[in-house]
Image (spheres, grey):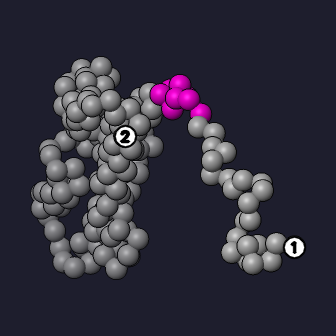
Amino acid sequence: MTSKQKKLYWYEFGQVRENWLKKGSLTSTETDRRRHALQLKALGYEQSSVSLSNAELDRVIAVFRAEANPADFNAQMDVQDSPDRLRKALIQRCHVAMEVIGDGRSPEGYLATIAKSICGQLHWPPVDNRTLGHVAETVERRAAIIRSKRPQTSQKLTSQKPVNQPQSNFDQANPF
């Protein structure tokens, strides 16, 4: 984390701490234990606060803001679905691109192979959203190449009515 990110982390946690202190006194050990619990809630796994990635920091900050301002609807919504919404959207992009690629392959196997070439792990979907984003971009590029190589379908003349025939029932009744 950069120094600015560390300052943001501690500022946001300071807001949480102030909220807790309004409700009653806490020891520094209890405060630290609760901070770790919030971080675990945000990430779902143990991670040192000094080695958070940008995405991890975003999730932790969202949880801190929701804890500091429980009545703030936007803060609550940021916690609930920001990482999950992004993940679902990236997976959806991959599957849409796979519909173009098709060719009878297993979408999960194909996507896992791409993930392996990007991050070295044969796992679908990838654990982190960054790798998932790279997979989505790769599959979308491949789908665009396939689309560009497909012959362009032009409108068929058979869909147009012959010139000499009436265009509607009204024309049949009134040929003039």
Identify residue type, mark 1: Phe
Name the spot of residue 36 as percent of width and height, x first: 17, 53
Whether 169 is drawn above or below 134: the answer is below
31 inside magenta stretch: no
Counting residues from the N terminus, which is met first, the one under dot 1 or under dot 2?
2
Q: Which residues are magenta?
A: 145-152
Q: CA distance from mark 1 to mark 2?
A: 51 Å
Question: Which residue is depicted at the point 24% across and 73% down?
Answer: 21
Q: In the visual, does 168 lie left or right of 93?
A: right
Q: Residues within 10 Å of mark 2 (few under 14, many from 20)?
A: few
Disc 2 target residue:
99
Disc 1 target residue:
176
Whether 173 is drawn above or below 4: the answer is below
**Does residue 46 appear in the picture of this structure?**
yes
Quarter of image, res 109: top left
**Does residue 141 appear in the picture of this structure?**
no
151 inside magenta stretch: yes
Q: In the visual, does 109 lie left or right of 57?
A: left
Quarter of image, res 104: top left
Q: Secondary structure at mark 2?
A: helix
Question: Which residue is depicted at the point 23% across and 55% down?
Answer: 42
Q: In the visual, does 31 lie left or right of 168?
A: left
Q: Secondary structure at mark 1?
A: loop
Relative depth, front residue between 90 and 69: 90
Relative depth, front residue between 96 and 168: 168
Relative depth, front residue between 126 and 168: 168
Identify residue type, mark 2: Glu
Where the C terminus falls, by quadrant? bottom right
Name the spot of residue 41 as percent of width and height, x first: 18, 57
Name the spot of residue 123 as percent of width and height, x first: 19, 31
